[in-house]
Image (cartoon, helix red, strand yellow):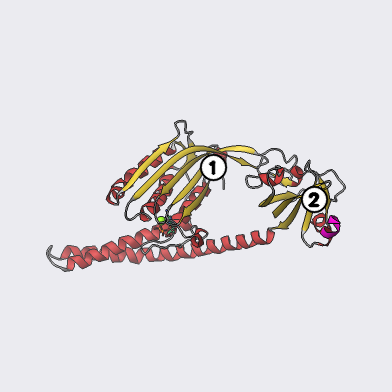
């Protein structure tokens, strides 16, 4: 009966028994995966293990239902990214049913978006480059004018305004170029605590002025990581300045460093044929730096826009701080994430892989 219903569904549906073996696939699933339901196919062979899909691969008894992105491996060994919705059912001989929806279309859309962003970046960089020279001309002329006025001449004030604004524009241009053409990191073995301390020293005065308390904690045994220390300081500065901007009338800024282990796909996804055996996921070590503030927080509807270039809610902001930080962290093989509660505060976390080969991407 259940199988008759499943057969009619347009979506790929797979049923599993208690040991995780496939007991049934509808036609859509057979078409997607190339298997038929007669073989002894185990869920751990069907689903490629990954940090996000652990629940799907093993589907432990305590879990009643999951909805996750995962990768399934077809009979011809091709990897198909899917959205899995799996639910426990209590039918005789049947333990769980999974519905698989390929996410290729969604991925293609994401790629198009990345391409679009890349060309926006290129365009912005081109414009920025063109603005640089005339801007330098304006700056030098204002400086010459200023030097020709007597010190108490009120026109000095106007020349100073020009010079300040030229400075500001130059900084924006620098950021734009940095975002559009990120520099290859020069990796050296480095203690992230040094970057944190150095960056905190730069903002200490500002924090004091705003009555923001600064806390800096770290695990004693923090391994060194392969990073470009200058770029790391830049990321931290962006995050810390964002935190300070969110606390104009005081609060607490906390930096915390520790080691975390994340489960990553065992095969590393290097070769297409590398799928068998799907095997246990590998725990990979990361140094995690968390920057937390007790500021105004981020409204839910803005959370998904934070890493979009030029997204800003600050009048003086360019909206590039987080985009640049994300580009740098990714270039190091790491990741960055944000959690926030409006009115309570925000926590931005960066994870940097401890092993060097993860920092040698691209
Ligand atoms: N710690 C934080 N607390 C509250 N809002 C934040 C925090 N960090 C980022 N945001 C929000 O995300 C937006 C984008 O941040 P991002 O650093 O990319 O740009 P910006 O700070 O506005 O400008 P820029 O960094 O280029 O000077 C901010 O305008 C702000 O709305
Ligand atoms: Mg910023």
Name the image quarter holding the N terminus. bottom right
Residue at the disc numbered 1: 359
- Please, which residue is most extreme toward the top here? 221
On the image, the x and y values in percent for residue 258 come to 48, 37
Residue 332 rendering spot, x and y as whole percentages: 52, 45
149 left or right, relative to 191: left
Please report the bounds of the magenta region as a residue range. Answer: 1-5
Quarter of the render that holds ligand 1: bottom left
Which one is earlier in the sequence, the residue at label 1 or at label 2? Answer: 2
Q: Residue sitting at 48 percent across and 65 percent down?
A: 123
Does ligand 1 reach within 8 Å of label 1's beta carbon? no
* Residue at 74% in and 44% down: 273
Cα distance in 3D space between marks 1 and 2: 40 Å
The numbered disc on residue 15 is: 2
Disc 2 element: strand
Indicate yes or no whether the magenta region holds residue 292. Answer: no
Q: With respect to residue 90, does 170 lie above or below?
A: below
Residues under numbered marks 1 and 2 in contact, where contact means CB atoms less than 8 Å apart: no
Q: Residue 187: horizontal and vertical position, in percent?
A: 48, 41
In the foreground, 138 or 32? 32
């Amino acid at each position: 009966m259940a199988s008759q219903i499943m057969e009619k569904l347009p979506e790929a549906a797979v049923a599993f028994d208690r040991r995780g073996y496939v007991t049934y696939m509808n036609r859509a699933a057979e078409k997607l995966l190339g298997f038929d339901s007669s073989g002894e196919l185990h869920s751990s062979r069907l689903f490629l293990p990954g940090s996000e899909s652990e629940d799907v691969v093993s589907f432990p008894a305590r879990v009643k239902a999951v909805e996750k992105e995962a990768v399934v491996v077809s009979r011809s060994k091709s990897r198909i990214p899917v959205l899995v919705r799996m639910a426990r059912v209590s039918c005789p001989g049947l333990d769980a049913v999974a519905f698989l929806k390929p996410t290729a279309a969604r991925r293609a859309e994401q790629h198009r978006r990345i391409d679009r962003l890349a060309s926006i970046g290129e365009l912005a960089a081109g414009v920025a480059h063109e603005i640089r020279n005339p801007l330098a001309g304006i700056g030098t002329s204002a400086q010459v004018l200023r030097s020709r006025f007597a010190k108490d001449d009120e026109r000095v004030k106007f020349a100073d305004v020009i010079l300040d604004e030229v400075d500001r524009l130059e900084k924006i241009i620098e950021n734009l170029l940095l975002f559009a053409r990120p520099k290859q990191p020069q990796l050296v073995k480095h203690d992230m605590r040094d970057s944190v301390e150095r960056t905190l020293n730069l903002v200490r005065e500002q924090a004091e002025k705003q009555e923001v308390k600064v806390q800096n904690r770290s695990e004693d045994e923090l391994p060194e990581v392969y990073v470009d220390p200058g770029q790391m300081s830049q990321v931290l500065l962006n995050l810390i300045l964002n935190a300070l901007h969110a606390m104009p009338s005081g609060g607490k800024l906390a930096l915390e460093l520790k080691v975390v282990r994340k489960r990553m796909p065992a095969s590393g996804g290097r070769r297409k044929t590398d799928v068998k055996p799907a095997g246990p996921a590998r725990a990979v070590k990361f140094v995690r730096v968390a920057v937390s503030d007790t500021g105004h927080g981020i409204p839910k509807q803005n959370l998904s826009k934070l890493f979009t270039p030029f997204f800003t809610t600050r009048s003086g902001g360019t909206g590039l701080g987080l985009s640049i930080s994300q580009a740098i962290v990714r270039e190091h093989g790491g990741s960055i994430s944000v959690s926030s509660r409006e009115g309570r505060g925000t926590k931005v976390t960066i994870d940097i892989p401890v092993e060097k080969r993860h920092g040698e991407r691209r």
